[in-house]
Amino acid sequence: MMKACAALACAFAAGTAIAQDGPTPEEQAQSAIETRQAVFKLLGWNMGPLGGMLRGNVDFDAAVVETNMSRIASLGPMIPDLFASDTSEFDSLETEALDNIWTNMDDFADKASALVDAANAAVETAAGGDDRATRQAIAAVGQACGSCHDDFRLD
Amino acid sequence: MMKACAALACAFAAGTAIAQDGPTPEEQAQSAIETRQAVFKLLGWNMGPLGGMLRGNVDFDAAVVETNMSRIASLGPMIPDLFASDTSEFDSLETEALDNIWTNMDDFADKASALVDAANAAVETAAGGDDRATRQAIAAVGQACGSCHDDFRLD
C-alpha cells in the first residue's frame, strides 16, 4: 500500500513540479507555454500521416483517418483552456503564440471549435467510405489549422 | 487561396520538421520521445487539479472532474501508439521510459487501457453527483497512473 500511495502522490504531482517557495510568475508562464505546446505536438502527430495521405507518401487508410480525426476532435477543446493563462507580458520566453490571442480570445476559441467541427465531420466522412470525400475532409481540417495559425501564430 | 494552401502545407508539416536528407535514426528517436512526452504533459495537466481536490487545495467541482476525466479517457488510447517506435537502443537520449516497455508491450497497453476504464468510470461517477464516490474514482485513476509508472517509468 505504501508503494501505491507513493505512486499516487507521484501521479498527482506530475506536471506541477514546484520549488520550495513556489514557482515565480515567469516559471509559471514557462510551464503554461510547455503544456500548451503539448497539445499542438499531439495534433501534429495525428495530422502528420493524414497530410501524407493527401501528398501520396502515406497509403490512404480510412480507419487511420477515423482514429486520428477522432483524436484531433478530442484534443481541440483543450486549446482555449490551455491558453487561459495570458503569458504575453513575458517577452523573454520563447513562444510562437501571438499576443493577440488574449485580446481576441473569443475568436481564438471559435477557431478551435471550427477545428473540432471539421475533425468530427472527417470522422463521419471516413466512416462513410467515400475516399474522395474523406480526402476533402482532411484538407478542410488542415485549413482549420491554418486559419488559426494565420491569425494567432508567429509565421 | 495561396495563403490557405501555404497554411495547409504548414499545418501538415507541424511536428515533422525534417532536415534536407531526412532525420537520422537518433533524431527520429528524439522526436518520438518528445511526442510521447506530450501526452503525459496533458495527462498531468488534466490530473493536477483533481489531485488538488483530493488534497484539499483545490475546491471540489464535479463538472471539472467530468471534463478532465473525459479528456484523460481520450488521451489514454494514444499512449501505446506513441510508444510504437522502440527507442531503447538510443542510450544517449534522455527519457524516463524504461526499456521493458518494448518487451512487455501487451502489459503496457493493458495499463493504458485500465487508465481509460478508470477515467471513464470517474466521468460517470462525477455525473452521478456523489462527491465521496467521485473522490474515490479520482484516487482510482491516480492508482492507474501509478501502477504503470511503477513498472515502466524510471523512479
Image (spheres, coloured by chain):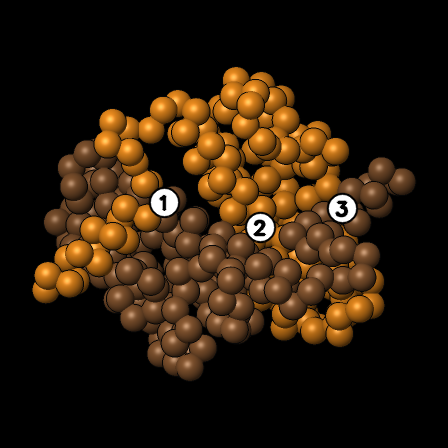
Chain colours: A orange, B brown
Viewer-proximal residue among B21 and B1: B21
Report whether A75 appears left or right of B47.
right
On the question of residue A6 being in view, the answer is yes
**Front residue of A131 and B75:** B75
Residue at 58% x, 31% y: name it.
A94
Look at mark 1 in the image and give the residue it sits on.
Answer: A15
* Residue at the right extreme of this rendering: B2
Q: Do the CB atoms of the residues marked 1 and 2 lie less than 8 Å apart?
A: no
* Residue A148, above or below A98: below
Q: Is residue A76 visible?
A: no
Q: Chain of mark 1?
A: A
Which element is circle 1 on?
loop
Please state which amino acid type lies under the numbered disc 1: Gly
Chain label for disc 2:
A
Q: Position of residue B89 (x, y in %)?
A: 52, 73
For discs 1 and 3, the disc positioned in front in the rendered view: 1
**Viewport quadrant of the C terminus of chain B:** bottom left
- Residue at 24% x, 32% y is A20
Task: Give the number of the disc on residue A113.
Answer: none
Disc 3 chain ID: B
Label annotation for residue B10: 3
How many angstroms separate mark 1 from mark 2 (CA)? 16 Å
Query: In this view, which residue lies farthest toward the front?
Result: B92
User: To which residue does mark 2 refer?
Assistant: A41
